Amino acid sequence: MSTVLKALHLLDLFTRSQPQIGLSDLARLAGVNKATCFRLMADLCAAGLAEQVDASKEYRLGPALLRLAALREANVPLRDAALPDLQALARQTGETAHLSLLVGTDLRPLAHAYSSAHASKITMEDVRVFPFHATSSGLAVLTFQPPTFREAVFARPMPALTAQTQTDPAMLRQRLGQIERQGFAESHGTFEADVTSFAVPLFDALGRCTGALSTAAVASRVGPAQSRLIRTALITTARRIIALWGGCLPPTLDTIWTASETLAQEPT
Amino acid sequence: MSTVLKALHLLDLFTRSQPQIGLSDLARLAGVNKATCFRLMADLCAAGLAEQVDASKEYRLGPALLRLAALREANVPLRDAALPDLQALARQTGETAHLSLLVGTDLRPLAHAYSSAHASKITMEDVRVFPFHATSSGLAVLTFQPPTFREAVFARPMPALTAQTQTDPAMLRQRLGQIERQGFAESHGTFEADVTSFAVPLFDALGRCTGALSTAAVASRVGPAQSRLIRTALITTARRIIALWGGCLPPTLDTIWTASETLAQEPT
DNA sequence: AACCAACGGTTCAAATAATAAACCGACTGT
DNA sequence: ACAGTCGGTTTATTATTTGAACCGTTGGTT
């Protein structure tokens, strides 16, 4: 393995729960010799990617990361970075794909992509806010918010947009639990009649859910096979976008997603 | 030179004006062999610190930086990172040191440190906002803001806090020009009577001025020698804090500061 | 169309830098 | 006073890095 990769691997050992690590621990964690670890960390420190705490001699992530990350964000805004994957999702599924972002207390569309597979498209160009209670994206995001946020949303008015819209907080809480277990959200005509939609949550660098990825399709088109295809495509695309954003997928959700991915590969 | 440093040096070649660089250019810029450059970039890409643009094969900074930077910021908030340097500044100068941050349209105190050298201290514990027109910090920050921001500030009410306070926009514009040339701001009793204060601007990762570092002293204590000492200490500390924050000092200001630093080292 | 230069990427012997065990002084708790 | 750990250093040995030359491709020029 190259020396550079060994050094950069050391950076990944720093986590939120263990933000500062001593030399010996670091060497143990990385499975490298202590002397090697020392030299690698010295290099990382020289480049500013790591630094040593004054008092204890422990290491932690360095200030240069801030500069480089700001540069990256300036050059490749989140939207642009995700757009190709979003378009690929629309192509693969043949359905309209949406990318939404949590802005303050609202879930707002960030980008969308259409497929050319079908003449009938679901357009949501003029939607400015995705209602949490009536869209699959909203439910997906809501599921991974802290309870205070969830209850604040339930306390706001939740209009019944269609005959199918669920507006009872108790029922919705139950839905969220279901979504958490299965790793994705779905909605059947709760936002617009005859529109079936699936969504998965997206996570930022600190593991917070800050958006959702979804597809919307004419209900009649979504049979069991198409439903399965959409869900697996959503998961793999979500994985890519989260990685692209430097995000961090919660381990529990990761295992759920992995399970449904492997399930999809098995013969029907 | 270690391979790791060579690799990490490559990251510093990406700038705002040149965010994507091809392999050959990169090798030329870094002064390394093309094959070497290729391997190093492959490693950086594997670690996510860099990535290749799909269409052109150019390289750019990668998504992992976002994750790592968020982690760094979560573990070492700006305030904590700068505090030791701020305290050192207070110790070196024997005066009160202030660190202020631009929050929205206001300049707010972020931290302060006192010296034990003198019995009479300048305390500004209860100041919630630094007026731009009446404090050295305010003027320092204002100098490096876009014209629209400056004029918006001048359009707001600018109360005369002391007999010395300058409130005429035309005069203030002239002051800003002077500050830009000399690389630091000063105020003599414009915020509080008999308080002389010096300030230098601070810059974030994108080169925007987002705060200031300042000292405040009883006017009678600040003779020519003390004034010179304070200014050089401010500059060196500001350099450290900007580096710690992953900030980016504008080149023009850098040369001005370097000039005054070397000047200070010469015999009187 | 033929040419040329420059591109990203690959190869392989030669050169160099990385490695790991042992060691050091300092500190800590027993 | 001891044993154990820490961060850091040294050393010969070893494995990785290096760079000139070489692909196949691309894009512009003659």
Image: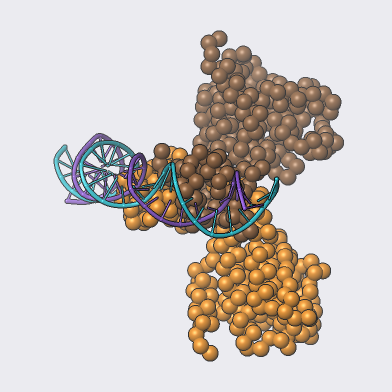
Chain colours: A brown, B orange, C cyan, D purple
Say which residue appears at 50% left-offset and 38% top-offset: A31
Residue B112: in sight, yes or no? yes
Viewport quadrant of the N terminus of chain B: bottom left
Say which residue appears at 66% left-offset and 42% top-offset: A17
Q: Quadrant of residue B35?
A: top left
Identify whether B207 is placed above or below C17.
below
In the rendered image, residue A254, in percent from the top left (x then y), is placed at 61, 28
In the rendered image, residue B102, in percent from the top left (x then y), is placed at 69, 63
Identify whether B54 is placed above or below A134.
below
Identify whether B69 is placed above or below A155.
below
Say which residue appears at 67% left-offset and 55% top-offset: B77
- In this view, the residue in front, A212 or A22, is A22
Residue B61: in sight, yes or no? no
- On the picture, is A25 further left or further right than B16? right
Say which residue appears at 50% left-offset and 85% top-offset: B266
Q: Quadrant of residue B165?
A: bottom right
